[in-house]
């Protein structure tokens, strides 16, 4: 009896013209549909499958990976494969790994879900800027998803970990990681260009300020790019400027214009408190330009001027790249929203 015939006897629904790895997938599906394997049951071992179906381990692994990506089975680290559901409900399974959840990440998440709609199962994880957590999330989930959508902002060798994800499955958003293998999707902010272009647009408003002060927190992962763009703008326009890590009461001077991008907008709050204490008015005695727009900044102190990228677009474009099966390299440029604080 030839190999195809043996496989057809194991599962009568298998066609002779099917590729070998799909024969394994259909064999497993047949066992599930006929209740020989139930939800949460462990699949036969890799050796058992290769012996039973007379296929190579490489072919068996490809068939198992196919079922993993469809969400029909799941892999448990160092334990084996288990039945997850009876049939595929969505063509894509997305592992969305974010650095944290805040109002900006919430925009990415909801615009991604709205665009992908009923075409995918989406699981969300957070690494909280912890490299070991990030690495574990990637390694343990590699077989289980058709795509990984990731925000990084991590200290550590992210390149080595990200390269473990096949390029066609890898979508990086918000930050442009360097030296990654293959052709993959990346939708990112260009922090150096964004601040230079934004400050150039705001030159008429900045003329009345004697000094520009960039408040760059030590923990900010993209601080270097912002600093480079800030210094380039200041040099090209002969603007007196300085860079600090925190705002101190004794440091602040009337005539300063501050650019802030602290993680929780704490520097904005500190500056507003200093201004109130000294009787200064934002937009007149001192200026404030803050990164990333929120509803609060729209109304706080009669409006805070912001540099903000379109996070809704970031999530939308990531989903479109998956649905259209395209590789996209796209800068998501920031825009200035001018309000009374400048």
Image (cartoon, helix red, strand yellow):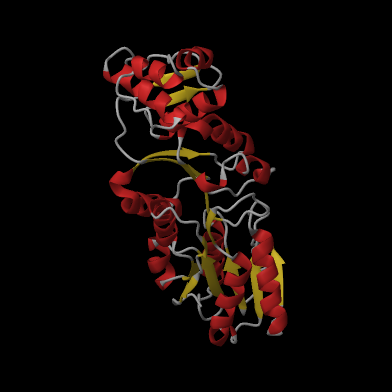
What residue is at 64 percent from the left and 65 percent from the top?
A: 226
Q: Quadrant of residue 213?
A: bottom right
Q: Is residue 272 above or below residue 62?
A: below
Give the side of residue 56 with respect to residue 301, left or right: right
Residue 164 position in % (x across, y down): 61, 39
Q: Is residue 114 above or below residue 305?
A: above
The quarter in which the N terminus is drawn is top left
Asked whether 193 or 323 is in front, the reply is 323
What residue is at 34 percent from the left and 28 percent from the top?
A: 15
Residue 150 shows up from this direction: no
Asked whether 196 or 274 is in front, the reply is 196
Q: Quadrant of residue 262?
A: bottom right
Residue 297 position in % (x across, y down): 43, 65
Residue 75 position in % (x across, y down): 48, 24
Asked whether 99 or 49 is in front, the reply is 49
Which residue ends up furthest to the front in the rendered image? 1
What residue is at 60 percent from the left and 35 percent from the top?
A: 135
Which residue ends up furthest to the left in the rendered image? 34
């Amino acid at each position: 009896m030839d190999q195809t015939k043996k496989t057809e006897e194991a599962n009568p629904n298998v066609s002779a013209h099917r590729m070998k790895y799909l024969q394994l997938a259909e064999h497993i599906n047949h066992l599930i549909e006929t209740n020989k394997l139930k939800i949460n049951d462990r699949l036969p071992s890799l050796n058992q499958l290769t012996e039973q179906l007379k296929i190579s381990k490489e072919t068996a692994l490809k068939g198992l990976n196919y079922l993993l990506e469809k969400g029909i089975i799941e892999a448990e680290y160092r334990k084996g494969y288990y039945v997850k559901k009876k049939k595929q409900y969505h063509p894509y399974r997305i592992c969305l790994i974010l650095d944290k959840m805040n109002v900006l990440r919430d925009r990415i998440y909801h615009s991604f879900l709205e665009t992908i709609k009923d075409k995918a199962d989406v699981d969300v994880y957070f690494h909280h800027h912890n490299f070991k957590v990030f690495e574990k999330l990637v390694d343990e989930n590699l077989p289980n998803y058709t795509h990984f959508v990731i925000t990084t902002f991590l200290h550590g060798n992210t390149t080595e970990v990200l390269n473990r994800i096949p390029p066609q499955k890898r979508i990086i958003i918000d930050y442009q990681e360097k030296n990654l293998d293959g052709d993959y999707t990346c939708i990112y902010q260009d922090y150096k260009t964004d601040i230079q272009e934004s400050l150039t647009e705001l030159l008429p408003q900045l003329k009345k300020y004697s000094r520009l002060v960039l408040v760059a927190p030590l923990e900010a992962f993209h601080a270097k790019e912002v600093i480079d763009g800030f210094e380039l703008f200041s040099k090209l326009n002969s603007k007196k400027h300085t860079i600090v890590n925190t705002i101190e009461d004794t440091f602040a001077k009337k005539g300063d214009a501050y650019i802030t991008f602290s993680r929780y907008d704490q520097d904005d709050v500190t500056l507003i408190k200093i201004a109130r204490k000294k009787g200064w008015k934002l937009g007149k005695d001192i200026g404030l330009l803050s990164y990333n727009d929120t509803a609060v900044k729209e109304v706080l102190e009669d409006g805070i001027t912001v540099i903000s990228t379109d996070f809704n677009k970031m999530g939308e474009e990531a989903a479109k790249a998956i649905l259209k099966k395209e590789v996209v390299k796209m800068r998501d440029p920031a825009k200035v929203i001018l309000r009374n604080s400048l």
